[in-house]
Image (tube, grey):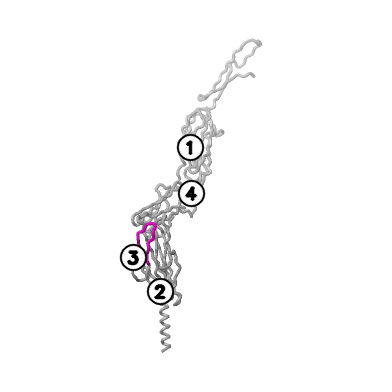
Amino acid sequence: MKAFAFLFLLSLVFLTDLRAQSVTLTWEVPASGEVTKTCGGGLLFQARTPGPFANIRINVSGFCSPTTYDWDFVSFIPALGSCTTLPQIRHPISAAWLNNPPPCSNPPTATCGPNADIRIFHPGFYTFRLCVTSTACGGQSACAEISIRALPTSNFPPAITMENIIELTLPIANTERLEASVLDPTDAHTFYWQQAGANPMAIILPSPGDSPSNPVSRPRGSNTTNTEVDISQITKPGTYCFTLNAQDEFGAASNANECFLVKPAPSTLGISITPPGTAPDPNVLITPVNNVPLNAEITGISVYNDKIRYEWSQIAGPTAIPLPPPAYTANINDIPVSSSTFNCPPINLNALAYGVYTLRLTVEDEYYPGLITQDITFEVKPPPSNLVVSVNPAIATTTDPYHDYTFSGEVTGIHVNSDVIQTYWRAE
């Protein structure tokens, strides 16, 4: 009989060791766990085991004695940036107010229990936790968390913080991102990215979050949500703009916009102008000048650059040459480009008077200060004449040194377009 009684008691101990331990925290007043709160001033919540006047109902079961109760403040997400005082817990309820009071133990003769008071000061989202442990019965432990959602008296839209990028240089590193964060600690909210239609090229936005119909959704009490756009996809220079839009469940909306310049690497620009004439003297043109092309090319353009400004000007010459207006090198759809050389449209030289001409080509990088110039000088001449000189009389002799003779000369074979033929007499 004694042996049976011993086995019976041992089985009770074993069953007690195997029973489930649980800790639950549930809201009673208010049942939703939501309150309205201004900035400042304490608001008290009572966490109690079954009994009257409890805001939060505590249920602890399945633990062997002695037990230890530990209340902790887990997190606070403020709704207003200027109201950030941390909450306080009083545990036991006769103890001092602290953020995280120390655990208290409850041997059979002690008065420590799970009851506590919680005090908050500002609107925001709070999380608290109660853990119960026992070293008896093989060691037991269980925890439960509960949240307080304190709404501000006025609804505030989600707060957006976006990275500030001034400019980037192509090619962009594959780790480059435009980073942003969205925070609304009290309300459920959504957000999505947009890119400006004027962007030189469209890139793939994160999904979800790439359109109003496919936003990122965040529940109530969410902490800060980080989001980013992979801007390493950009391969074309120009100004890019991106917008992050957010809206909470009550319709309060906000957005943030970021624009930045994407530049190509600097070009090592050079100019090469082909003289308009032909061998043996390409810097000389012979009239008449009809549709003679003057060709030039710009070299050393960065492979990620699709715009270089160039401009012709006339420095000297008797005839004004019609020159094209300043222009940019043609935009190239495929970036990076396959060639770093741009051939300028030729200038047609027509009906130029005799003389020396100088034209200048000025080239400037669209994205970087400074410019380079190159001059071309050429001469326009009439066609060569087939000159023949005759003198009358061709030969004259005399023995009288005082006799006067008259000589005349004639030049023939002058080209009809010749400008000036110089003649003079010389005694030999």
What range is drawn magenta here? Answer: 33-46
State the CA–CA distance, disc 2 to disc 1: 85 Å
First in sequence: mark 1 or mark 3?
Answer: 3
Q: Is residue 336 left or right of residue 208?
A: right
Q: Nearer the viewer, residue 354 or 138?
A: 138
Q: Is residue 391 left or right of residue 341?
A: right
Q: Amino acid at mark 2?
A: Gln
Using the image, tell me which numbered label, if any, was put on residue 21: 2
Element under label 3? loop
Does residue 334 show up? no
State the CA–CA distance, disc 2 to disc 3: 26 Å
Q: Nearer the viewer, residue 353 or 306?
A: 306
Is residue 22 placed above or below 220 in the rendered structure? below
Density class for disc 2 (Cα within 10 Å; few <14, some 14-19, many ≥20) is some
- Label 4 sits on residue: 168
Element under label 4? strand
Q: Amino acid at mark 3?
A: Val
Q: Amino acid at mark 1?
A: Glu
Density class for disc 3 (Cα within 10 Å; few <14, some 14-19, many ≥20) is some
- Label 1 sits on residue: 311
Is residue 209 placed above or below 143 in the rendered structure? above
State the CA–CA distance, disc 3 to disc 4: 55 Å
Residue 383 is inside the magenta segment: no
Give the image location of residue 318, x and y in percent. Answer: 50, 28
Give the image location of residue 194, x and y in percent. Answer: 39, 52
Q: Nearer the viewer, residue 414 or 255?
A: 255
- Label 3 sits on residue: 29
Q: Is residue 59 left or right of residue 287?
A: left
